[in-house]
């Protein structure tokens, strides 16, 4: 879908986004609003510093407060708002959190997916459903890059939650013909990710405050990193074309096909921040993490002509600027609040 038809595609379309105030959800929701879609956003927790709030997106959408595990809520939203398109991004997304609390991760990531799928099966207004799986669904493999035909075999809690969710989505398509497409992304990065345990935001934060970044791994772990704006474009492209026989019911890898080691990535960020003198602290404590992961994106390229627009350097430059601006704003608001409190004390 190209040209004027694509530009008009989202106008007045009713779209449901789960996890809308999360990292990827904030960017996707912002783009949908820009395209004049009528967005209904599912929010579990209030996140005051999220991009969803600080950019003002929250005031431009209909917000529903609730949990993915609440089936009745999901069905009600799809029905009452006559949803046409659903982007299911809501999930517990951190590997270490999943290791500490596997049950809540399974509840969110597996029960959440079957609730969405079952509700879509029953509510016939929904014409397209894009589900976020992950490259972690593939598990560890000596055969790289991963292709969409490879077996899904996660071994640890987070990876297993994605493997299960992915397979359940395939079952709903193969059994009921649901209009679903599955995305398996590499490591997504960009401004607005406030999980500073992740390597890119964590390293930038260290650079901002002139501290040595800390690596949980030995630095040799290999990953494929993709900029959040490219992921948003891929999601919307898949949704726009879900009626195609080669798209509906399919899984698509989304990445840049340019893997890089964690240590190389950290040093690149420090260089771009002008902080080459900071030396990473390598703890080598990472457990239950896959050491080598990267994707083949031949399928989405051949079927839809989609390719990423941001190479790593370009994406990192935008990301670094976002975080420097973010921390400057936070410092400004903190100082302003402190000054206000002091003034109140003086007036009393």
Image: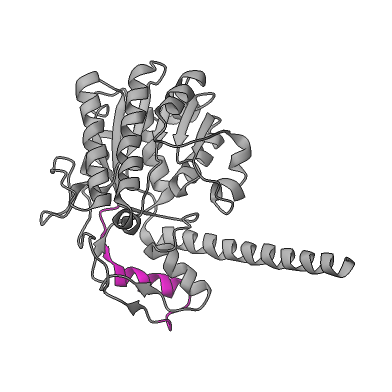
Res 286 seen here: yes
User: Given the current orientation, which residue lies at the most extreme bottom position?
Assistant: 277
Say which residue appears at 25% left-offset and 73% top-offset: 218
**Residue 118: percent from the left, percent from the top?**
32, 24
Q: Locate residue 249: give its quadrant.
A: top left
The one of 81 and 248 positioned closer to us in this rendering = 81
3 within the magenta span: no
Q: Is residue 221 left or right of residue 142?
A: right
**Residue 238: percent from the left, percent from the top?**
34, 33
> Does 331 appear above or below 76?
below
The one of 32 and 116 positioned closer to us in this rendering = 116
> Does 273 appear above or below 167?
below
Q: Is residue 89 left or right of residue 296?
A: right
Say which residue appears at 23% left-offset and 39% top-offset: 164
Quadrant location of the N terminus in the rendered image: top left
State the count of labels. 0
User: Given the current orientation, which residue lies at the most extreme top position?
Assistant: 124
**Residue 69: percent from the left, percent from the top?**
39, 35
272 within the magenta span: yes
Q: Which residues are magenta?
A: 255-278
Res 302 seen here: no
Which color scheme is applied?
one colour
User: Given the current orientation, which residue lies at the most extreme right position?
Assistant: 347
User: Given the current orientation, which residue lies at the most extreme left position?
Assistant: 142
**Residue 44: percent from the left, percent from the top?**
49, 41
Q: Is residue 223 left or right of residue 15?
A: left
> Does 11 appear above or below 60?
above
Q: Is residue 29 left or right of residue 232?
A: right
Quadrant location of the C terminus in the rendered image: bottom right
Say which residue appears at 38% left-offset and 45% top-offset: 231
């Amino acid at each position: 879908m190209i040209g004027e038809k694509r530009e008009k595609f989202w106008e007045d379309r009713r779209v449901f986004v789960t996890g809308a105030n999360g990292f990827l959800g904030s960017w996707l929701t912002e783009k949908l609003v820009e395209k004049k879609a009528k967005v209904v956003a599912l929010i579990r927790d209030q996140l005051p510093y999220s991009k969803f709030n600080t950019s003002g997106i929250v005031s431009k959408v209909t917000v529903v407060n609730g949990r993915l595990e609440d089936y009745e809520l999901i069905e009600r939203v799809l029905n009452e708002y006559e949803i046409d398109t659903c982007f299911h991004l809501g999930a517990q997304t951190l590997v270490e959190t999943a290791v500490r609390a596997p049950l809540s991760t399974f509840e969110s990531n597996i029960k959440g997916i079957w609730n969405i799928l079952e509700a879509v099966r029953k509510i016939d207004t929904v014409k397209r459903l894009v589900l976020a799986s992950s490259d972690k669904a593939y598990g560890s493999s000596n055969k790289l890059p991963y292709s969409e035909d490879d077996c899904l075999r996660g071994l640890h809690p987070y990876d297993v939650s994605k493997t299960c969710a992915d397979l359940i989505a395939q079952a709903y398509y193969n059994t009921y013909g649901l209009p679903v497409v599955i995305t398996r992304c590499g490591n997504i990065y960009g401004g607005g990710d406030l999980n500073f345990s992740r390597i890119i935001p964590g390293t930038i934060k260290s650079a901002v405050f002139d501290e040595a970044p800390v690596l949980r791994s030995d630095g040799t772990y290999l990953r494929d990193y993709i900029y959040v704006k490219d992921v948003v474009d891929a999601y919307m492209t898949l949704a726009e074309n879900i009626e195609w026989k080669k798209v509906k019911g399919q899984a698509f890898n989304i990445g840049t096909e340019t893997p890089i080691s964690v240590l190389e990535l950290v040093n690149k960020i420090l260089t771009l921040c002008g902080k080459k003198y900071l030396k990473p602290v390598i703890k080598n404590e990472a457990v239950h993490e896959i050491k080598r992961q990267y994707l083949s994106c031949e399928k989405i390229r051949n079927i839809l002509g989609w390719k990423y627009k941001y190479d790593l350097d370009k994406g990192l430059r935008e990301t670094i600027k976002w975080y420097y601006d973010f921390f400057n704003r936070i410092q400004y608001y903190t100082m302003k609040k402190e000054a206000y409190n002091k003034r109140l004390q003086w007036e009393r």
